[in-house]
Amino acid sequence: MTKKILVIIPVYYSSERLVTRKEFLAKCVSTDFEVETRSIKYGTYSIESSFDEELNAPFILEEAVKAEKDGFNAVVIDCFIDPAIDAMREALKIPVIGPGETSMHIASLLGNKFTIITVAGPTLNKLIARNVEKHGLSHKLASIRNVNLPVLELRKRENETASILIEEGSKAIEEENADVLILGCTELSEIADKYNLQEKLGVPIIDPIKVAVKFAELLASLNLSHSKKAYPYPTQKPISYFETLNITKLLE
């Protein structure tokens, strides 16, 4: 029987973009697995801060709970900072995979030190550093570097993005002794693929969303998931719901 992996896009995607993302990720799994992509209905168009992460979290959880009810065998969150991952693991029995967590652990197996190359902003660097520490891998981190472009500009400026990735990757290898590079934003995946960055830089370059989808396949194949002793179900209690509030409008 074919097994299904849901990749949750934790930001808004157009229907056309969901299709191209699905086609890209479907290449990562075996023929007895299917990949589906769904994006959240409300929230920011990118996640680059704690504000973005927390604002989008309820809608991420909504899609995750639906996924288990719809018969998916695993859930992958398509964002390097793994938003709402602990909450999803509490709510679900099926495996929930975060690209950031997965890629950092794999990088620690492939080399002595890894560098994460992400997009723009000190806020995002702070979130990534927090997650590196959370997973006990600070001693493996050579550096966090930036392409200094916002997420929503990456695909519009592909050539520039690829050039900066090569430049920053070379500096990490030569100046900081990084022997593995991690793409610190899943929106970089298709660009890295298109421009053959691993071949050009000569070290392993980990594409977080690819390894997350493949790891989800592995766990589903082995009938393994996160321990409910580590991630117990949340206590049942009444919840008050509200109409979607445009918080960003209030901040203007």
Image (cartoon, grey):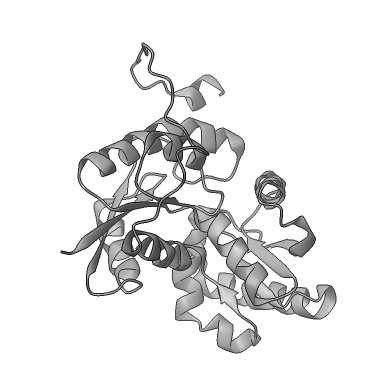
**Viewer-closest of 156 and 42:** 42
At x 51%, y 84%, the residue is 196
Please determine whether, in this image, residue 122 is positioned above or below residue 247: below
At which x and y percent is residue 37? 29, 54
Q: Is residue 218 left or right of residue 98?
A: left
Please determine whether, in this image, residue 115 is positioned above or below residue 121: below
**Viewer-closest of 187 and 27:** 27
Q: Is residue 103 left or right of residue 241?
A: right
At which x and y percent is residue 36? 26, 57
Where, quadrant-wise, is the C terminus in this rendering? Answer: top right
Q: Is residue 41 visible?
A: no
Can you tell which quarter of the image residue 143 is in? Answer: bottom right
At x 38%, y 13%, the residue is 237
Q: Is residue 201 visible?
A: yes
| In the image, farthest residue toward the right | 175
Where, quadrant-wise, is the N terminus in this rendering? Answer: bottom left
How many numbered marks, from 0 up?
Answer: 0
At x 32%, y 64%, the residue is 221
| In the image, farthest residue toward the front | 229
Can you tell which quarter of the image residue 234 is in? Answer: top left
At which x and y percent is residue 149? 61, 58
**Viewer-closest of 41 and 213:** 213
